[in-house]
């Protein structure tokens, strides 16, 4: 495959955009080489500016769960655009999508729309703090909740729980209110609560982690968080930006049958447009402006184009619940096919899968948290990524990202992927 045009576009972009991209993972830093510039996409395929066709396993990091250029979404968008693209006034569309979302999501009474997953998580934490009158939050090493300051925190030196900024620009003051625990390690959470029994406003977690590869929760782990929250009067925030409308119509809450106090959304909920949202009970949501004192706002929040795309997407998902099973089966086909082929090579590997999320780590240690995810061999990963790319398969360009399958993928696409996989891993 040729990437001349991508290469020259990347050079041009780097002169006017930091790193040539508007979101770092796109720059291929983890795998090296030149990012692919997309021209268009249809169904399960990406077509790049050099005329290559790639099978897409990132689905725009989730939103394209039904494939690219999904007709009902495109139709809703085009029809809506002709009526005006932003008003700064309420529209009926917002109530319509809110009703549908609340119907699909378990346990929640009200929803507020924002413009990204980052905003949703940031607002959810502010709401939790306002509601509980407490300041600290607990997050898990390796979980991603967007790029707002409170979440750009890593394990600090010294005491286990103290957070330290993991980006310049995040203040020590912010870091001290984010306490770190280990995914799948309930005792690490208990220790934090014992240290700060009356100060934790909320735990925020990806109920199935997707930002250190795919890491499912161990049996009992989320239940354990639920009961610790109840015991200590903290709220449980599920960050369902990835899992929402992907693992089930009602996301991880439905699939795993655990109640969160606040849940955040993004990705699928916008049908490919920039949308985020957070939901909670009336009791909690009553604290949000303009009903309550916790401030939150947005000029383009509830934007009619974004709401039209989101509504068409949610309607499509709500009307075909059997899609979830089908997508899970496709993902299973990929998973088992990879397992069968890599298990005979002697390469170190772990494949984690939950629903339509799956990831391959080049390590023999079970990947259950950030530490074990970081043990993966990145040299293998780089070669694997570029090998697959040469074969026409676009995987996440980082070992810390999950694959997101979409329903436009056929069994033939998956088998094509598996033949490519076999050739590529033999060459590692
Ligand atoms: C993508 C993601 C976010 C951030 O959403 P953006 O729309 O990129 O701001 C937050 N949480 C999780 C779990 C995500 O995967």
Image (cartoon, rainbow, N blue to C red):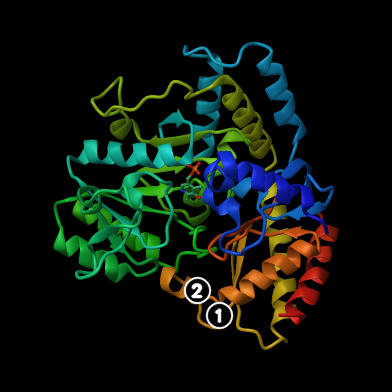
Q: Which residue is painted at 39% across and 68% down in the image?
A: 184
Q: Is residue 402 left or right of residue 336?
A: left
Q: Which mark is residue 122?
A: none
Going by the image, does 71 lie left or right of 318? right
Q: Quadrant of residue 232?
A: bottom left
Against 276, residue 54 (above or below) is below
Q: Quadrant of residue 188?
A: bottom left
The residue tagged with tag 1: helix, strand or loop? loop
On the question of residue 333 being in view, the answer is no
Point out the frontmost of discs 1 and 2.
1
Q: Position of residue 268 (x, y in %)?
A: 59, 41
Horizontal and vertical percent for residue 237? 36, 47
Q: Residue at x 76, y 74 (%)?
A: 424
Residue topped by disc 2: 367
Query: For this rendering, which residue is in front, 194 or 230?
Result: 194
The residue where tag 1 is placed is 363
Residue 50 % position (x, y): 81, 48
Mark 1 crowd level (few <14, some 14–19, many ≥20, 10 Å Cα): many
Q: Which quadrant of the figure contains the C terminus?
A: bottom right
Check contact, mark 1 vs mark 2: CB within 8 A: yes
Q: Report which quarter residue 319 is drawn in.
A: top right
Disc 1 from disc 2: Cα separation: 8 Å
């Amino acid at each position: 495959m040729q990437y001349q045009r991508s290469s020259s576009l990347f050079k041009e972009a780097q002169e006017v955009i930091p790193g040539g991209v508007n979101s770092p993972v796109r720059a291929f830093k983890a795998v090296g080489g030149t990012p692919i510039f997309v021209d268009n996409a249809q169904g399960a395929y990406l077509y790049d500016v050099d005329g290559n066709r790639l099978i897409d396993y990132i689905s725009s990091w989730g939103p394209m769960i039904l494939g690219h250029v999904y007709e009902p979404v495109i139709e809703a968008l085009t029809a809506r655009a002709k009526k005006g693209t932003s008003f700064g006034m309420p529209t009926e569309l917002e109530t319509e999508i809110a009703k549908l979302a609340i119907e699909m999501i378990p346990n929640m009474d009200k929803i507020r729309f924002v413009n990204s997953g980052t905003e949703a998580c940031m607002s959810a934490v502010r709401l939790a703090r306002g509601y509980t009158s407490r300041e600290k939050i607990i997050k898990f090493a390796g979980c991603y909740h967007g790029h707002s300051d409170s979440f750009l925190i890593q394990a600090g030196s010294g005491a286990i729980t103290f957070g330290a900024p993991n980006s310049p620009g995040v203040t020590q003051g912010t870091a001290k209110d984010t306490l770190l625990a280990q995914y799948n390690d309930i005792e690490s959470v208990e220790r934090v609560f014992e240290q700060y029994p009356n100060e934790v406003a909320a735990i925020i977690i990806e109920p199935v982690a997707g930002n250190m590869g795919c890491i499912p929760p161990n049996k009992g782990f989320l239940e354990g968080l639920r009961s610790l929250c109840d015991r200590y009067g903290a709220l449980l925030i599920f960050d369902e930006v990835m899992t929402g409308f992907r693992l089930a119509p009602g996301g991880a809450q439905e699939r795993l049958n655990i109640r969160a106090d606040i849940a955040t959304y993004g990705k699928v909920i916008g049908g490919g447009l920039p949308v985020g949202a957070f939901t909670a009970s009336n009791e909690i949501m009553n604290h949000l402006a303009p009903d309550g004192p916790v401030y939150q706002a947005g000029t383009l929040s509830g934007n009619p184009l974004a709401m039209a795309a989101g509504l068409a997407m949610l309607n499509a998902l709500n009307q075909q619940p059997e899609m979830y099973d089908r997508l899970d089966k496709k993902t299973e086909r990929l998973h088992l096919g990879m397992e069968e082929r890599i298990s005979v090579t002697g390469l170190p590997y772990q494949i984690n899968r939950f629903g339509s999320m799956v990831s391959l780590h080049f390590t023999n240690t079970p990947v259950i948290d950030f530490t074990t995810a970081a043990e993966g061999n990145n040299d293998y990963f780089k070669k694997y990524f570029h090998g697959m790319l040469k074969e026409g398969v676009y995987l996440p360009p980082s070992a810390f990202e999950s694959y997101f399958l979409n329903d436009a993928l056929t069994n033939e696409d998956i088998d094509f992927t598996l033949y490519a996989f076999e050739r590529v891993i033999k060459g590692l």
